[in-house]
Image (spheres, rainbow, N blue to C red):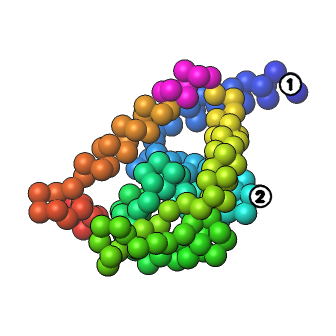
Amino acid sequence: MGKKKKEEKKEKARKKEHAAIGPADVSGAVVQAARSVRTVLSRNLLSIGLYAGQDGVMLALAEAGGMTAGALAARLGVKAPTMTRTIGRLEAQGFVERRPDTTDGRLTVVDLTRAGRDSLEKIGKACELSERQALEGLSDKEVRTLLKLLRTVDGNLRGVVLQDGDKAVAEDF
């Protein structure tokens, strides 16, 4: 490659580096990265017989012990019908069981079965592999910085609630 071509490439790279960031560049990049991570994690979980979302339920149950479907849905930020379907699938696969609450017979508690507890290590390995794949090429310092920045962004967005409890939407601007 000639000297002129190299200079053109360098100039193009400099322009790209200094280009203005558009209004959706950051949010688009965050959303796309999250989708990519979730896709890779889903593929890694599928290899151990689990589907996307099931890992979160199982990890929450491992951490907190038995929980109601409503408590699980609230903890994981999903709607109750979604959680009910996920629990049904996990129960059919033998990973969780439902039983009556010992203090309130009207409630049903979901808990891990032995097979569910036995699969937690595999879930951890699938998550670890996905994270390693996502962070390949980043230094420990860069990973710490990324984590700090993502937590800040998340905190900012969680705080975007107006006085009356409604979330801001485009028509409010």
Task: For residue 93, say whether it is visible.
Answer: yes
Q: Quadrant of residue 134?
A: top right
Q: In the displayed structure, would residue 37 be above or below residue 139?
A: below
Indicate the secondary structure of the residue bearing disc 2.
Answer: loop
Indicate the secondary structure of the residue bearing disc 1.
Answer: loop
Please state the extent of the stretch shown in magenta in the rendering.
Answer: 139-145
Q: CA distance from mark 2 to mark 1?
A: 48 Å
Residue type at mark 2: give it.
Ser
Residue at the far right in the pictured view: 1
As for residue 28 lying within the magenta part, the answer is: no
Q: Position of residue 122 (x, y in %)?
A: 70, 49
The residue where tag 1 is placed is 2
Q: In the displayed structure, would residue 155 be above or below residue 102?
A: above
As for residue 140 lying within the magenta part, the answer is: yes
The residue where tag 2 is placed is 47
- Front position in the image: 153 or 132: 132
- Residue in the image at 24% along x and 62% along y: 167
In screen coordinates, is 152 left or right of 48?
Answer: left
Magenta stretch: dominant SS?
Answer: helix
In screen coordinates, is 67 left or right of 51?
Answer: left
Q: Classify the position of the N terminus by image quarter.
A: top right
Q: Quadrant of residue 94?
A: bottom right
Q: Classify the position of the C terminus by image quarter.
A: bottom left
